[in-house]
Image (tube, grey):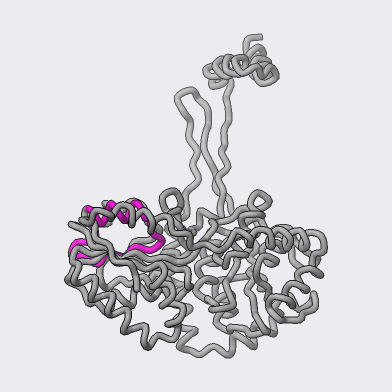
């Protein structure tokens, strides 16, 4: 049973603070294991990756078998039904169109001193995309990671997808093909992240690694950051639903379970202005847990981390939401647009009762790789911006250097950086000859 809180209760603040401080991430001991894996892959390359894949995925491979061949890709993609293929292509088209609008423009201008200033955007040369496997495989994650990279103009896209016991999901490989992925490797875990970051005999290193994964993947991404760029350190999934009583309790129960079924450490929370309605939703969750295929996982998540919070009004709901900074925020109220203006910290917002979070996971268009664990307070979901970088441009004319150069010399002297100041002074002196 989830926690039931009411903002009018004397102990509410303490109980709400407990929810905010819940530790849902996995044990820190994971980091020690990951450090060893990364060191091993750096030292032994393919040999380490092959041994670790045999150990963790129960899959014996040779170096030549790490990467899916084109023939294997063809054979697996051919297994996908026309219905599933059409769904993937529809999703890909919507994701591509949405992310194309995010591309920034280069700029160049001449300022009042006569200096030419600007910036230029260029893609990273190679990106590695991690696609989760194991408990569930996600072709949608292939689309969400690879398409923004392609829109950004990344030249080489490599994905790693674990295939425990050699089981392959044809939808994942078809999604990779639709998205324009260049290389697909049947490996996962920290060893895959290490291989992408440092390279092996068979896997060339990349410049940026994106995509969600388990605790080992998250720890590995944290450790390789600096050698390569990463998108974020993603934790267990989470959803916050703010709803009034004018909703179908079963719909909201399903929305809450849509995240709870991801992981026993996922978190699903309902905030409502009507306590009786909140209990109706909780009852609807209990009923759904009787039949859901992933009920053991969803039930554990709901029991350990779920909550139903009753508030005085929607303004208070927005305040609590901003403190939580949820990954996913559903606003099932009469005027979701007005309420969304008050919700300034959220990874993704879903407006109205006909916009379930699951639409965002697949075909909405915006990315589903989103900040978790309250990191939406300072970060954003995956976008084309993760695959491009900005280079600034400047050109001084003699007139511009004469106008602003003396100030640069003064600041350099104040910082005791003699060569800095002299590099400017030499040019200024030449202008006065």
Q: Is residue 405 above or below residue 206?
A: above
Identify the residue shown where x is 48% and y is 31%.
110
Q: How many marks?
A: 0
Image quadrant for the N terminus?
A: bottom left
Q: Is residue 73 above or below residue 24?
A: below
Would residue 392 be found to the left or right of residue 433 on screen? left
**The magenta stretch spans residue 46:** no
Image quadrant for the C terminus?
A: top right
Identify the residue shown where x is 24% and y is 66%.
243
Would residue 259 be found to the left or right of residue 30 on screen? left
Identify the residue shown where x is 80% and y is 64%.
45
Point out residue 85 in the picture as x, y percentages from the top left corner.
Answer: 49, 84
- Residue 139 visible, this orientation: yes
Magenta residues span 316-337
Judged from this view, the residue extending furthest toward the top is: 433
Would residue 94 be found to the left or right of residue 341 on screen? right
Q: Nearer the viewer, residue 233 or 312?
A: 312
- Residue 362 visible, this orientation: no
**The magenta stretch spans residue 320:** yes
Judged from this view, the residue extending furthest toward the front is: 10
Q: Nearer the viewer, residue 151 or 283?
A: 283
Point out residue 309 in the picture as x, y percentages from the top left corner.
Answer: 27, 63
Point out residue 270 in the picture as x, y percentages from the top left corner.
Answer: 30, 66
Point out residue 262 in the picture as x, y percentages from the top left corner.
Answer: 47, 74
Q: Is residue 17 above or below residue 37?
A: above
Would residue 33 be found to the left or right of residue 235 on screen? right
Identify the residue shown where x is 58% and y is 14%.
410
């Amino acid at each position: 049973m989830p926690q039931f809180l009411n903002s009018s209760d004397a102990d509410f603040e303490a109980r709400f603070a407990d929810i905010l401080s819940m530790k849902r991430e996995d044990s820190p001991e994971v980091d020690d294991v990951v450090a060893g894996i990364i060191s091993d892959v750096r030292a032994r390359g393919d040999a380490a990756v092959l041994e670790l894949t045999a150990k963790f995925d129960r899959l014996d491979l040779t170096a030549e078998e790490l990467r899916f061949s084109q023939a294997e890709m063809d054979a697996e993609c051919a297994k996908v039904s026309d219905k599933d293929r059409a769904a993937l292509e529809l999703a890909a088209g919507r994701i591509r169109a949405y992310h194309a609008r995010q591309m920034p423009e280069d700029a160049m201008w001449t300022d009042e001193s006569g200096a030419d200033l600007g910036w230029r955007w260029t893609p990273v040369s190679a990106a590695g995309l991690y696609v989760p496997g194991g408990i569930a495989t996600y072709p949608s994650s292939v689309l969400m990671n690879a398409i923004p990279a392609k829109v950004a103009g990344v030249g080489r896209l490599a994905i790693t997808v674990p295939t425990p016991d050699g089981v392959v999901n044809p939808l994942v490989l078809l999604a990779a093909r639709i998205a324009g992925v260049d290389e697909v490797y049947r490996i996962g875990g920290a060893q895959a992240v290490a291989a992408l970051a440092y390279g092996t005999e068979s896997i060339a290193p990349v410049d940026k690694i994106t995509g969600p994964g388990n605790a080992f993947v998250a720890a590995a991404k944290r450790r390789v950051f600096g050698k390569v760029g990463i998108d974020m350190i993603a934790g267990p999934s989470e959803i916050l639903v703010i709803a009034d009583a004018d909703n179908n309790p079963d719909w909201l129960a399903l929305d809450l379970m849509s995240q709870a079924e991801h992981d026993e450490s996922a978190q699903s929370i309902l905030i409502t202005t009507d306590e009786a309605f909140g209990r109706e939703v909780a009852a609807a969750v209990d009923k759904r847990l009787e039949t859901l295929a992933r009920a053991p996982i969803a039930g554990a998540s709901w029991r350990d981390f779920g909550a139903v919070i009753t508030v005085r009004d929607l303004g208070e709901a927005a305040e609590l939401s901003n403190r939580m900074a949820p990954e996913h925020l559903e606003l099932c109220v009469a005027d979701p647009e007005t309420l969304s203006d008050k919700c300034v910290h959220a990874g993704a917002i879903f407006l109205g009762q006909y916009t379930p979070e699951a639409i965002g996971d697949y075909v909405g268009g915006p990315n589903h790789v989103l900040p978790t664990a309250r990191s939406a307070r300072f970060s954003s979901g995956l976008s084309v911006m993760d695959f491009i970088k900005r280079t600034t441009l400047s050109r001084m004319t003699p007139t511009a250097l004469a106008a602003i150069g003396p100030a640069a010399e003064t600041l350099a002297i104040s910082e005791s950086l003699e060569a800095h100041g002299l590099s400017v002074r030499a040019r200024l002196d030449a202008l006065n000859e």
